[in-house]
Image (spheres, rainbow, N blue to C red):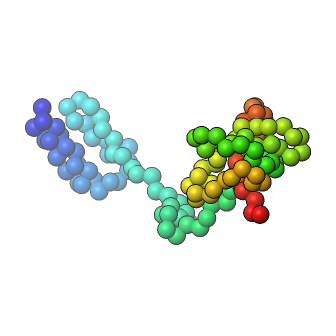
Amino acid sequence: MRCFLLRLLALVASLYAAQAFSPSPSSAVSVQGRRWAPVMMARAPEGSNNNKKGAGPRPRKAKDDVIELEGRVTESLPNAMFRVELQPTNSIVLATISGKIRKNFVKILVGDTVKVELSPYDLTRGRITFRNRG
C-alpha cells in the first residue's frame, strides 16, 4: 500500500511539473479511473500586508450592542472576578477582567474606578475594560 502511494505521488508530481501548473480545463489528470484537477493556491491581493511585523496596530472595533458604564470596585473575588458598583444606578454587577487588561497585568484593587461593558442580554455580569488612574 505504501509503495502504491509513493508511486502515485511521484506520478502526480511529474504530471504537475510537466504542465507547469497551467490552469486549464484539459489539465485534469486521470489516475486509475479517478480525475485529479490541479490545485491552485489562492494569493493575497497586491496591496495587502499579511505579515505581522510590518502591520500597524489594529483599530478597535466599535461594538454597538455593548453598554459601557463607569463603576467602583467594591469587592475582589477569586478567579479575577470583582463586584462593581455602577455609579449612575448604584446597582452591583459581577465583572471579570478583559483579555487586554489580563495580558498587560493591570492590577485592580478595591476602590478603583473602572469602565465596565455590560451585555444587553445579562445586565448582572460585565467585563472590566479600563482602569482609571488616580
- Where is the C terminus found, in terms of image quarters? bottom right
- Look at the image and tell me in which quarter the N terminus lies: top left
Q: Which residue lies most toward the bottom here?
A: 54
Q: Residue at x 86, y 46 (%)?
A: 87
Left or right: where 7 falls relative to 125? left
In the displayed image of the protein, which residue is found farthest to the top? 33
Q: Is residue 92 above or below residue 58?
A: above
Label count reads: 0
For residue 29, which quarter of the picture?
A: top left
| Residue 46 in view | no
Choose between 40 and 91: the one closer to the eye.
91
The residue located at (61%, 64%) in the rendering is 57
Residue 32 located left or right of residue 130: left
Placement of 90 over or under 14, stated as above or below:
above
The extreme right residue here reads 88
Asked if residue 113 can be seen in this view, the reply is: yes
Q: Position of residue 37 (x, y in %)?
A: 33, 41
Q: Position of residue 47 (x, y in %)?
A: 56, 66
Q: Residue at x 61, y 44 (%)?
A: 80
Q: Position of residue 22 (x, y in %)?
A: 35, 54
Q: Position of residue 5 (x, y in %)?
A: 16, 37
Farthest residue in the left direction?
3
Q: Residue at x 16, y 46 (%)?
A: 10
Q: Quadrant of residue 93?
A: top right
Residue 52 vs residue 97, the one in the foreground: 97
